[in-house]
């Protein structure tokens, strides 16, 4: 009788052990089924967080671009150069060195693949790869950004020509690119009269060129800040 009791106890212990083992295996199996789902959720949560951070960065960058677009003086007056000699680049017709880096916020004429004629932009930044990000001046509400190379950019004058220094002006019959009135695009034109060649006393702006645009006969008045050398756009 005692032997049967002992066998019974042993059997119960073994049965209890088997039940616990079964429960453990069941829990492990359930976890193995749940873990991929949990991992997937965690991965999706991380991805959503990354997208939200990127979106936030884009919004901040867009706001910064809009602020810059609205703060830049696109059509106002340029200062006169009163510094020492030699006269610096971008004083009137004196060109910017083609191998020199163009700083941010400089106004430039840009020939892009998306536009037929060069357009007015400002330099946003130079990328680590050496290209330039520029922003279209005509799209104030929805900024349009172009990625271009250095040779596609022509910086605009930062000082007015010195009227008694002819090298700071484009002479008569020069081929130039100038912003056509009421646009932000640069079209080919010929100089009829530089600022120093004005014939009327006390003109509204003594730094205007008289130009005839290609294909026209009418004479237009264009401020010197919006006139650059045609040769920089020759392919």
Image (tube, rainbow, N blue to C red):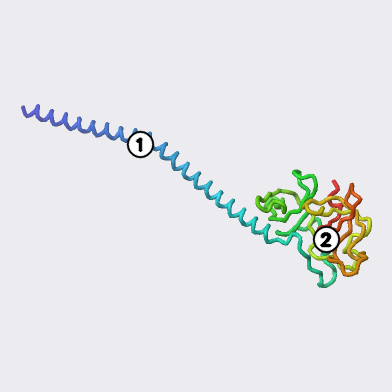
Report x, y in % for residue 63.
Answer: 61, 55
Q: Is residue 162 above or below residue 137?
A: below
Residue drawn 44% across and 40% down? 41
**Which quarter of the rendered picture does the N terminus lie within?**
top left
Bin the neighbour count of mark 1 within 10 Å (Cα to Cα): few under 14, some 14-19, many 20 and up. Answer: few
Report x, y in % for residue 3.
Answer: 9, 28
Reading the image, the residue beneath label 2 is 223
Bin the neighbour count of mark 2 within 10 Å (Cα to Cα): few under 14, some 14-19, many 20 and up. Answer: many
Residue 158 is labelled as: none
Q: Secondary structure at mark 1?
A: helix
Q: Is residue 190 above or below residue 8?
A: below
Q: Nearer the viewer, residue 15 or 36?
A: 36
Left or right of 170 on screen, residue 145: left
The reply to whether dot 2 and dot 1 touch (C-beta < 8 Å) is no
Q: Is residue 95 above or below residue 8?
A: below
Reading the image, the residue beneath label 1 is 31
Between disc 2 and disc 1, whose residue precedes?
A: 1
Q: Nearer the viewer, residue 53 or 120?
A: 120
Marks 2 and 1, how far apart at CA: 75 Å
């Amino acid at each position: 009788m005692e032997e049967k009791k002992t066998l019974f106890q042993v059997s119960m212990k073994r049965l209890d052990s088997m039940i616990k083992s079964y429960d453990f295996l069941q829990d492990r199996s359930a976890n193995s089924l749940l873990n991929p789902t949990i991992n997937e959720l965690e991965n999706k949560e991380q991805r959503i967080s990354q997208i939200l951070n990127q979106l936030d960065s884009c919004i901040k960058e867009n706001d910064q671009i809009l602020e810059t677009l609205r703060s830049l003086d696109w059509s106002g007056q340029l200062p006169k150069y009163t510094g020492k000699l030699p006269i610096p680049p971008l004083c009137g017709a004196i060109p910017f060195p083609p191998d020199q880096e163009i700083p941010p916020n400089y106004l430039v004429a840009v020939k892009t693949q998306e536009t037929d004629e060069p357009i007015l932009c400002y330099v946003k930044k130079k990328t680590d790869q050496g290209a330039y990000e520029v922003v279209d001046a005509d799209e104030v509400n929805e900024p349009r950004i172009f990625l271009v190379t250095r040779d596609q950019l022509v910086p605009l004058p930062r000082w007015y020509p010195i009227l008694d220094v002819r090298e700071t002006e484009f002479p008569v019959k020069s081929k130039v690119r100038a912003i056509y009135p009421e646009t932000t695009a640069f079209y080919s034109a010929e100089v009829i009269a530089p600022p120093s060649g004005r014939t009327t006393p006390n003109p509204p702006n003594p730094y205007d060129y008289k130009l005839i645009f290609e294909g026209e006969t009418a004479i237009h008045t264009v401020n010197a800040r919006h006139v650059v050398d045609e040769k920089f756009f020759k392919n």
